[in-house]
Structure formats: C-alpha cells, structure tokens
Image (cartoon, rainbow, N blue to C red):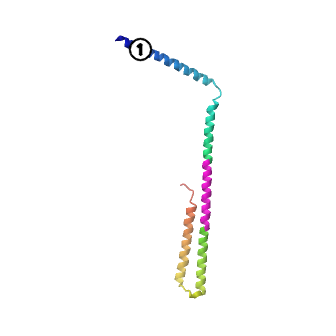
Amino acid sequence: MSEPESNLPKTRQSLNEELARIFEGITEVAQKEDQVKEPDPLALLGEEDLSKESIKAQVAQLREDVKQTKRINLFRLGMLVALFAVIILWIVSVMAITAILGFHLWGFTLSDAVMMTYITTTTASVFGLFLIAAKWLYPSTDKN
C-alpha cells in the first residue's frame, strides 16, 4: 500500500517541473517581445479600423440629425404659413363684419355689445392660438 502513495509525490514533482519549464518559456517570449521597439502593425490596424468605424457612426448620426432638423424646419415653415392664413382670415372677417355693420348692408345689424364681444373674443383666440403654436413649434432650449 505504500507504493501508490510514493508515486503521488513523484507525479507532483514532475508536474511542478513541467510547469516551471512552461513558465520559463513564457518569460523568455515576454522578454523578447519587450525588447521589440515597434509595436505589431496588425495590432494597430485593428485599432485604426475601430476608430474609423467610430467616426463613420458619428458621421451617420450627424447626417440623421441634419435630416431631422430639416424636416422640423419644413414643418415649422408650413405651420407658420397656416398660422399666417388664419390671422389674415381673422383680419378680413373682422373688417368685413365691421363694414357690413357700418354700412347697414342687406339690413344687417348687431348691437354694439355683440360687435365688441365678437372682436374681443376672435382677437383673444387668434393671439392664444399664435402663442400656443409658437411655444409648441419653438420650445425653449434651456435645460434648467
């Protein structure tokens, strides 16, 4: 029974010797690579490709941002034209009703209170619409 136990330390010793040889080989290779003055060009090539891909991704993101900004600006321009049309219609309607009332065309009459209410409410509505549209189309850029 003593023989298997005596083989075990020899196996450990041979394993330790083999590991020592492997580590010596690793140390030699590491020392040789440490003496190389230039880095491996293939290793740097991978880093350049990575930085190029990063730059390409940033350029693609900036292009998408520019497209989005153009779309937003076109939408804002369209909304401003529509808002301008509403304001023109408001001015024309107030002037037309005032003219019809003032010249008593077609027997049209309104009391002064009704006419004042019409002018006041339409003016307030148009200004409110303009304010809401302006705040919606052009939000403040403050992040505070």
Residue 92 placement: quadrant: bottom right
> 65 or 34: which is nearer to us?
65
Verify whether residue 68 appears in magenta: yes
Residue 66: image x %, image y %?
Answer: 62, 53
Q: Please, what secondary structure does the residue beneath circle 1 have?
A: helix
Residue 72: image x %, image y %?
Answer: 60, 59
Q: Circle 1 is placed at which residue position?
A: 9
Give the prevailing secondary structure in the magenta stretch.
helix
> What is the magenta range?
60-81
Q: Is residue 25 above or below residue 49?
A: above
Residue 39 placement: quadrant: top right
Left or right for 89, reference 17: right
Q: Name the residue: 61% across, 64% down.
A: 78
Residue farthest to the left?
1
- Identify residue type, mark 1: Pro
Left or right for 112, reference 8: right
Question: Does residue 54 appear in the picture of this structure?
Answer: yes
Residue 2 placement: quadrant: top left
Residue 8: image x %, image y %?
Answer: 40, 15
Q: Name the residue: 61% across, 86% down.
A: 103
